[in-house]
Amino acid sequence: MTSVAGWAAASTPGAFPPLPRAVAQSFYRRMRAVAPAAVGAIERDRTGDPERSFPDTACGRLAGSLDDAGLRALGMWTHHWCMRFYDDDTTVGRRLIREVAARPGLGWTADEVRWMLRESASAGPAAADRFTLPRAAAAQLSPADRRTLAHWPEFEVPRQRRPDQSG
């Protein structure tokens, strides 16, 4: 299991300049607002049918009830949660990330993308889906904002090995 230490990941040196503390704190405040509902939805979906269409899941209903800002906060919280606690039990969270990443026009900011990239880079290669949401969010930025990410850390994301199921 890989762990990322929240604020430390947001402020450590690396490819991106550290985020101002007030900016990072605003992200955490918004994520805390959606966290209780997200935890409940993820827990309900863990016990549900994994083949159910996304809109029919608890996570799908939660995502459908949020405006763009709420959906960005939900995506960031889920991304943060998956990066901190990445293991085989994050399947529901990773599905939620993919669904949020597929939503066009959420109004991502360069700071949000930079924060997610920093978290993704800190998580390391064990978290195979770690760039799904930041890449999708970066693609939605204006060209001017994309230029602020000129030092995008390009990591080759290796395929995760699956445990040998043969015996």
Image (spheres, rainbow, N blue to C red):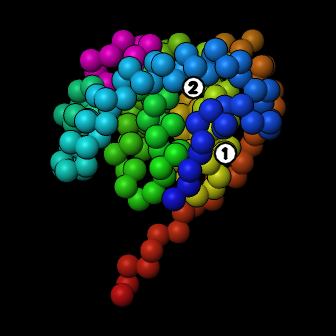
Is 26 situated left or right of 42 in this image? right
Which residue: 47% across, 69% down? 162
- Residue 102 shows in this picture: no
Where does residue 81 sit, x and y in percent of width and height?
A: 46, 40
- What amino acid is found at the position of numbered circle 2 in the picture? Ala
Classify 10 Å Cα crowding around label 1: few (below 14), some (14-19), many (20 and above).
many
User: Which image quarter holds the C terminus?
Assistant: bottom left
Which residue: 67% across, 27% down? 114
Where does residue 63 sit, x and y in percent of width and height?
A: 32, 25
Q: Nearer the viewer, residue 2 or 130?
A: 2
From this view, report whether residue 69 is shown above or below residue 43: above
Which residue: 80% across, 36% down? 13
The residue tagged 2 is 137
Q: CA distance from mark 1 to mark 2?
A: 18 Å
Q: Nearer the viewer, residue 110 or 138?
A: 110
Which residue: 46% across, 18% down? 30
From this view, report whether residue 90 is shown above or below residue 108: below
- In magenta segment, residue 68: yes
Give the mark toward the camera: 1 or 2. 1
From this view, report whether residue 147 is shown above or below residue 49: above
Where does residue 1 sit, x and y in percent of width and height?
A: 51, 59
What range is drawn magenta here? 63-71
The residue tagged 1 is 122
* Label of residue 143 in the image: none
Where does residue 15 sit, x and y in percent of width and height?
A: 80, 35
Q: Secondary structure at mark 1?
A: helix
Q: Main secondary structure of the magenta part?
A: helix
Is 150 situated left or right of 19 in this image? right
Is 64 situated left or right of 139 in this image? left
- In magenta segment, residue 18: no
Which image quadrant is residue 31 in? top left
Q: Secondary structure at mark 2?
A: helix
